[in-house]
Image: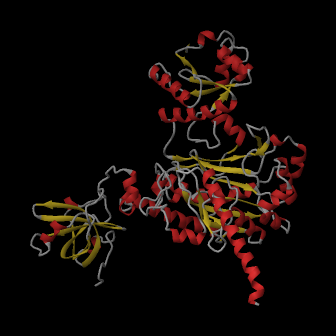
Amino acid sequence: MHEFRTHTCGELRKSDVGITARLSGWIHSVRDHGGIIFIDLRDHYGKTQVVIDPTKDFYQELERWRVETVVCFTGKVVARTPETVNPKIETGEIELVADEMTVLGETEQLPFLVAKDEDAPESLRLKYRFLDLRRDELHNHIVMRAKLIESLRRKMWDLGFTEYQTPILTSSSPEGARDYLVPSRVHPGKFYALPQAPQQFKQLLMVAGFDRYFQIAPCFRDEDARADRSPGEFYQLDIEMSYATQDDIFAILEDLLTDIFPKFTTKQISPAPFPRIPFRESMERFGTDKPDLRNPLEMIDVTDIFKDSGFQAFSKTVAAGGVVKAIKVSGIAKADNPQPRRFYDEMIAFAQECGAKGMAYIIWSAGETKSPIVKFLTGNELPSLAEKAGIQDGDVLFFLADKRALVNSVGGKVIGELGRRLGLIDPNVFKFCWIVDFPMFETDEETGALIFCHNPFSMPQGGMKAVETQNPLDIVAYQYDIVCNGIELSSGAIRNHQPELMYKLFEMCGYTREVVDDKFGGMIRAFKLGAPPHGGIAPGVDRMAMLLADAPNIREVIAFPFNQQAEDLMMNAPAAVDMKQLRELRVIPVPQELKYEETFKKLLAEAERIRAAEAAAAAMNASAAPEQN
């Protein structure tokens, strides 16, 4: 018999009754029924009930062991009586009557309970993450994530892609977030950077002729945490294809997602092809480029209706170049079940918290219109609004009026809040969409200069002809996002592989050819030596796992995450290192209490002193050299 186990704690069935088995695992719970002890023994695979008779010589030892002690039991498998069968677990028809017990690993006092859903502080859970991971829900999340990655790999191979690895130590490049830097011991004063993404490498693989690439790629960004983003590191399904159009990329990802998601969820999934919404349209309708299409609400532009309105708060906004937008909510003001006045007051307060000066509303109910602003509407505004919004009895329109960008921003938040408060968002569906046609350029609010709107390496639609003939602000790129339930899974693009076009685009933003060659020389050199058209995308593995697990934040699907301050409380990282290591790397720490300017002056003065001493020593050696010869 094996030293530790013949079966796992999730393996024994009624067909095993009568055999002798050995199980090892953690004591999950202990129950005393009139002297007979019942233990739920747990391992990675499940739980088995172990029965211990008080006549056994190891019976008294049980008083010494706490739950979460690791124990090995050997005994007979017996059938449970019909009234004691537990249908909630796979082994619920049997139990192990223990004849032997060996303690394999004792435990001290637990910082929090594993068997019970104790609401422990997150900092404590992260410090004892290995203990937290024993809990069923979190444990299952991590197993699901592993199976998700396995399924993604299989699907990508089935689709004709090959997995290649790219460097972890690379050079720093402007990717939109801060780099994690690694000082070089061999090259003092120089640094490697951990890759924010394998972007340049995967494009260079296309130039090298590998055609279809994928990788479950680790990425590193020194950025703040939020619910759907882990600080420090994350994983993405990195994809790149040669000779690919935007439609080709969409077809691959739609095939992937509609195949993978049903394996891990019973929720309804929107069928392919997914809706395609231009960026500007998404901002105007939903106030965001990450719309949650489960929410039926959107904004309607009613600026023209209030151009000459007697309600001056709106008409003056329009005259000043602003906009008026309405959000229609259907059926919440019907006479048999109207929303209370408090609901409207709270929504107005919410809009103000989001940056609006205020928010108006009009209620259509039982043939009447009710609103604090109705008395100011003297023209054709009400009939026009009813027609444009398709108003029916019980509907309500909420109004925002201000500069377009502010109205869109606040309106997007109001749409989300209304959806949540009114239960309009179906939790049992996954709705995907593509956001397409991102602008190539925008103007800097402070300087008015032309700057890249998103990714400067995307292919402009229309190529060089569009760049030379269109207003720069009208040029859109072959750049796209895949969004699910209001969460961006990934950005992607068809790449600009034409050097002259790249030079031209950077020139429009004030960069010379020399600057482009200096900062992106590797890519430019590659593109000058025969580059195929190519494009790609990189959906986040962590975010997919979070959606499939229905987890409240991304830390619930990562085995060992950082906290929101980018700290690993379990391993005490980041941590100080000793001076020997710093000297080897030629790194001088800057005390936090000192100002950077003062510190740099001191460092420069010290460097000058060292240079002077080295120069004096060199002069002395030079004068002494003839004598030594």
**Quadrant containing the C terminus in the rendered view:** bottom right
| Quadrant including the N terminus | bottom left
Q: Between residues 612 and 387, which one lies in front from this camera angle?
A: 612
Which quadrant of the structure image shows residue 160?
bottom right
Residue 198 visible to the viewer: no
For image coordinates 69% across by 28% down, the residue present is 403
User: Furthest residue to the bottom?
Assistant: 629
- Viewer-proximal residue among 61 and 503: 503
Q: Position of residue 512 (x, y in %)?
A: 85, 54
230 and 95: which one is in front? 230
- Percent x, y for residue 332? 50, 25
Q: Is residue 358 above or below residue 485?
A: above
Q: Position of residue 43 (x, y in %)?
A: 33, 68
Q: How many marks?
A: 0
User: Is 448 situated left or right of 127 in this image?
Assistant: right
Left or right of 473? Residue 221 is: left
| As drawn, 564 above or below 612 | above
Q: How is the image coloured?
A: secondary structure
From where the camera sits, is residue 253 visible?
yes
Residue visible at 55% across and 19% down?
A: 363
Quarter of the figure with residue 17: bottom left
Residue 594 horizontal/vertical position (percent): 55, 51
Depicted 311 relative to depicted 71: above or below = above
Residue occupying the point 85% across, 60% down: 499
Task: Please state which of residues 308 and 500 is positioned toward the viewer in this rendering.
Answer: 500
Identify the residue at horizontal 47%, vertical 61% (top origin): 573
